[in-house]
């Protein structure tokens, strides 16, 4: 687990401190409250699937697809650590998003390839292609005719609204709004214990898919564009290796 800290006035990760994984819930809440109240910050303790040390550390799991993808994700971090993009991981919030999004993209591709080649019996069933005009239909309907709760869309909306309130200096209003939204997620089956600035600071940096906790952050989108423009995963990683700032990433995605 990790203790994530963000300022209350803006969503930005300023600390990521490892926490003992067997800390009980009562201890988790005490630590979060002590940090938040003592430093006037937003804090949350989150579970982590792995750590990109050498060798990598990955949580035990019987889910082979998740396990292989997470192992690949952490080894990508090890690969990037020896290159400029990884060396600049902590230089700016954008660089953390660049590193995590790159590792997510590469980890997912490598994980799927490993499963297909060595464990095809565990490969998920291929999904049918979706017509372009049906990719953005709004909320789909259940057989009962009631809207299906779209987690990513709802989280995306929550992040955008929270960012807007914070930008206006309405910190207390933003925090009350996020708590109200947490209740909405809870009522729809998503057991989110705490939804605050620190939550978005952590989960928003994994921006390999549009929407969700990243909001309208352009950094993840730029990484996805570069992957789409690359000839292969190897080509993508070779190009990402030399990124040292969001501006340098933008330079790679702009037409010559």
Image (cartoon, grey):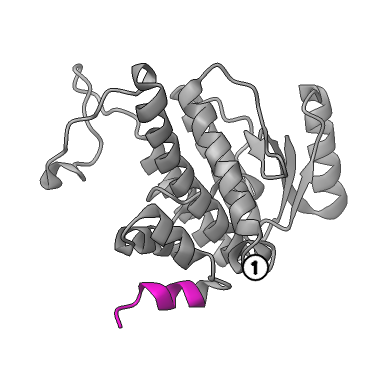
Residue 7 occupies quadrant: bottom right
Is residue 18 visible in the rendered image? The answer is yes
Q: Position of residue 87 (x, y in %)?
A: 67, 65
Residue 70 occupies quadrant: top right
Principal secondary structure, stretch drawn in magenta: helix
140 relative to 145, above or below: below
Report crowding for label 1: few under 14, some 14 to 19, many 20 or more residues within 10 A (C-alpha). Answer: some
Q: Please give the count of numbered marks on the rendered protein.
A: 1
Image-based side of 21 in relation to 106, left or right: right
* Residue 50 shown in magenta: no
Q: Position of residue 251 (x, y in %)?
A: 42, 78
Residue 196 occupies quadrant: top right
The span shown in magenta is 248-256
| Quarter containing the C terminus | bottom left
Image-based side of 252 in relation to 28, left or right: left
Q: Nearer the viewer, residue 125 or 20?
A: 125
Write the residue at 68% across / 39% down.
56
What SS does tag 1 mark?
A: loop
Write the residue at 53% across / 40% down.
72
Image-based side of 98 in relation to 137, left or right: right
Q: Which residue is mark 1?
A: 92
Write the residue at 54% across / 28% down.
67
């Amino acid at each position: 687990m990790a203790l994530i800290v963000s300022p209350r006035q803006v969503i930005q990760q300023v600390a990521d401190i490892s926490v003992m994984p067997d800390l009980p819930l009562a201890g988790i809440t005490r630590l979060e409250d002590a940090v938040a109240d003592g430093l006037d910050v937003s804090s949350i303790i989150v579970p982590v699937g792995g750590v990109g040390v050498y060798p990598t550390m990955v949580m035990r799991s019987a889910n082979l697809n998740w396990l292989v993808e997470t192992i690949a994700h952490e080894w990508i971090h090890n690969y990037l650590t020896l290159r400029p993009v990884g060396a600049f991981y902590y230089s700016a919030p954008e660089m953390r998003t660049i590193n995590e999004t790159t590792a997510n993209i590469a980890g997912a591709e490598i994980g799927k390839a490993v499963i297909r080649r060595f464990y095809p019996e565990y490969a998920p069933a291929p999904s049918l292609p979706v017509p372009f005009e049906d990719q953005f239909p709004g909320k789909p309907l259940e057989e009962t005719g009631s809207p299906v709760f779209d987690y990513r869309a709802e989280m995306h909306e929550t992040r955008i609204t929270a960012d807007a309130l914070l930008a206006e200096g309405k910190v207390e209003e933003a925090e009350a709004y996020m708590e109200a939204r947490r209740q909405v997620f809870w009522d729809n089956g998503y057991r989110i214990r705490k939804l605050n600035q620190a939550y978005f600071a952590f989960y928003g940096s994994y921006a390999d898919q549009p929407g969700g906790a990243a909001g309208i952050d352009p950094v993840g989108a730029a990484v996805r564009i570069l992957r789409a423009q690359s000839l292969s995963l190897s080509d993508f990683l070779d190009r990402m290796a030399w990124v040292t700032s969001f501006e340098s990433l933008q330079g790679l995605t702009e037409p010559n």
